[in-house]
Amino acid sequence: MQSTNIEPGSAAGTSPSWLIAGHESANPEKVALRFTGTITASILSDSDNDFEAVMRDIDAVALLINAKTGVSKSMIDFWQYLSERQFPRLVIVNGLELSESDFDDMVLIANRVLEQVSTPYLVLHDEVGEPSGLISLSDLTVHDYSHSEMKSYPADDELKSLVADFKVEFDEQFEEFGATGLSEGLFVPALPLGTNRNFGVKEIQGYLNSVTKH
């Protein structure tokens, strides 16, 4: 298990130390550079399961899943270690471009092999089927990343109808665990991250910043 400190972030004791960990195909080190804060990156290998060592001085974890390669045994074992100790944790899905598996597919896999996750955002696609933006299930705002700068605007009635059931499910989960659920290791969001387009960076950063250090 190879770990790399990416960015010093804020002074010790003022913000949590995050670990972004995943299979090498998901490029944890490259992904970690897209965020600010105290962040370490780690490549999970099936031949190395010294989780205590990699979690030393870490407060919270983002498990990085590449949609093209899925979830490895070491990722499942690592997640079980985190869950049993109720570390604040979330899932990031990348590799969505030109992939046979989309974000919804990976959420279903996470629900089956990790634990029940919540989806604050769903992925929107352009006319050729490539991911181009997100819709927030909390307020039904579209985050449009199809241009050089992100544009946000209210979803139209058709889109609201399409995501209505997903919104009900998300609202129920968020109401159950509350705003502190992530920090307490009870609320586990799954969030998409673009490679060619920047969707997910701002949204994920908001969740990284929301965790309080205990």
Image: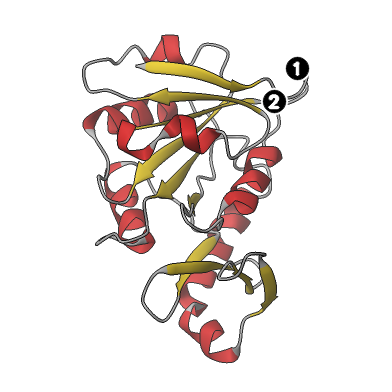
Residue 140 place in picture, x, y as percent: 63, 74
Task: Find numbered disc 2 in the image and state the secondary structure of the residue it sits on.
Answer: loop
Who comes first in sequence, dot 2 or dot 1?
Answer: 1
The answer to whether 191 appears left or right of 207 in the picture is left
Q: Which mark is residue 213?
A: 2
Q: Quadrant of the C terminus?
A: top right
Residue 152 place in picture, x, y as percent: 69, 72
Residue 43 place in picture, x, y as percent: 37, 25
Q: Quadrant of the N terminus?
A: top left
Q: Nearer the viewer, residue 57 or 94?
A: 94
Residue 149 picture quarter: bottom right
Q: Nearer the viewer, residue 103 or 90?
A: 103
Q: Residue at x 61, y 87 (%)?
A: 156
Q: Residue at x 37, y 78 (%)?
A: 128
For the residue marked with disc 1, what is the amino acid? Gly
Vertical placement of residue 60 versus 25, above or below: above
Residue 46 place in picture, x, y as percent: 22, 23
